[in-house]
Image (cartoon, rainbow, N blue to C red):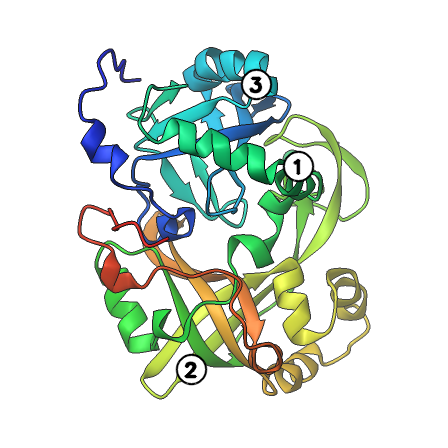
Amino acid sequence: MIAITNVQKEKRWGTYRIPLSSFPAYQNASTFEALVIQVLPPKTQGKNNTTSRDIVVINQEKCPMIITLWNDFHLDEGQTIAQMVNTTPTLLCFKLRASTFNVLSLTTRPSSALIINAPTKTRDALRDWYQTNKEEIIGMIEGQAYKNTDILLPRPLEQTISTINQALRLFNKKFYTAWVKVKTTLAPSQSAFWFATCNNCQKSINGDVGPNIKCISCNQNVKLEARTRILLELTDSTGTITASVLATEAEKLIGVNAEALRTTEDQDVDLSTTIQNALKQHTIVAFLRKYDSTFQGRASEKYSIVKSYLIQDLLMNETPQRKAVPFEEITSEGHTEMTM
Ligand SMILES: [Zn+2]
């Protein structure tokens, strides 16, 4: 953890307000300031009893987002924030990592730094904004807007959508995510369209669906449930990319849920044809993420769909919910000029 004793470079962060939605383009989130509006209960995870706590922050972008505070950040800043959350403290955040784990969220890493109620020039404006919009913000938190994929990843502007070819070039650089407009087909040779997961932490577990077990990831007594996982080929005129899609994001494309996939699997039903037929009707605008995967000691890059919109739904509703940040506006440091 970096101890910042003297905040001198106010200009560096005072002139930038980074829209939260631009973070996933890089894994390194730029410096930003937000209000802490909720603190969730602490969690203990894994064999090493790693501790963490999720807090929810918001700024003028009205896109409430989870920051997961790990280990020392949980025990130090997390405790302080928990004690004063009723006062809606501001939080100045340095070097957080963007993650698509909770659709879109941020996490601390060892080099991150957090300053509570830092004396910034922008602090008062943030507080005034909160007072003016308090009712709406409280409503968003009660509705768990920080988990709502429509709010975290609203339909993108046309100019922020890449072709497959452009997306692959972005992934070859420092980008981890991209929006694409593609047709969907089923990737060949898939043995199963679902897997068993912990119903608490959603981690994959080998076992039968149903019985209570102790989950080694979240240390809770949990049930195993079926979770849909489909491998898709996404195609446009410039190329094809293979990407996985999970749970409700997969189910809305194929029209079948995980439990139905699990039970029909034993009945000698040709699920591939049913799924392929459903997929062939779709053109989607999808938010892809790149991730590193290691299987049998071999590392490779994979892609998954975090969120998608069916093109027919987009055509019915023309108004974008929020201005997305075009890639051109993001410089190599991951900073972007204030666009709001
Ligand atoms: Zn679990």
| 3D distance between C-alphas at marks 3 and 1 | 14 Å
Q: Residues within 10 Å of mark 2 (few under 14, many from 20)?
A: some
Labels 2 and 3: the sequence-earlier one? 3
Amino acid type indicated by mark 1: Ile
Residue 250 shown left or right of residue 171 in the figure: right
Give the residue pinned by disc 2: 235
Above or below — where is 209 with respect to 163? above
Give the residue pinned by disc 3: 87
Q: Which mark is residue 138?
A: 1
Labels 3 and 1: the sequence-earlier one? 3
Labels 2 & 3 near each other (Cβ < 8 A):
no
Residue 243 in the image: state x and y as whole percent: 46, 67
Q: How many numbered discs?
A: 3
Above or below — where is 311 with respect to 52? below
**Between residues 271 and 130, which one lies in front from this camera angle?**
130
Amino acid type indicated by mark 3: Thr
| Quarter location, residue 1 | top left
Residue 97 in the image: state x and y as whole percent: 36, 38
Residue 277 in the image: state x and y as whole percent: 65, 87
Q: Nearer the viewer, mark 2 or mark 3?
A: 3
Instruction: Give the structural element (helix, strand or loop) at label 3.
Output: helix
| 3D distance between C-alphas at marks 1 and 2 | 41 Å
Q: Is residue 292 visible?
A: no
| 3D distance between C-alphas at marks 2 and 3 | 50 Å
Instruction: Give the structural element (helix, strand or loop) at label 2.
Output: strand
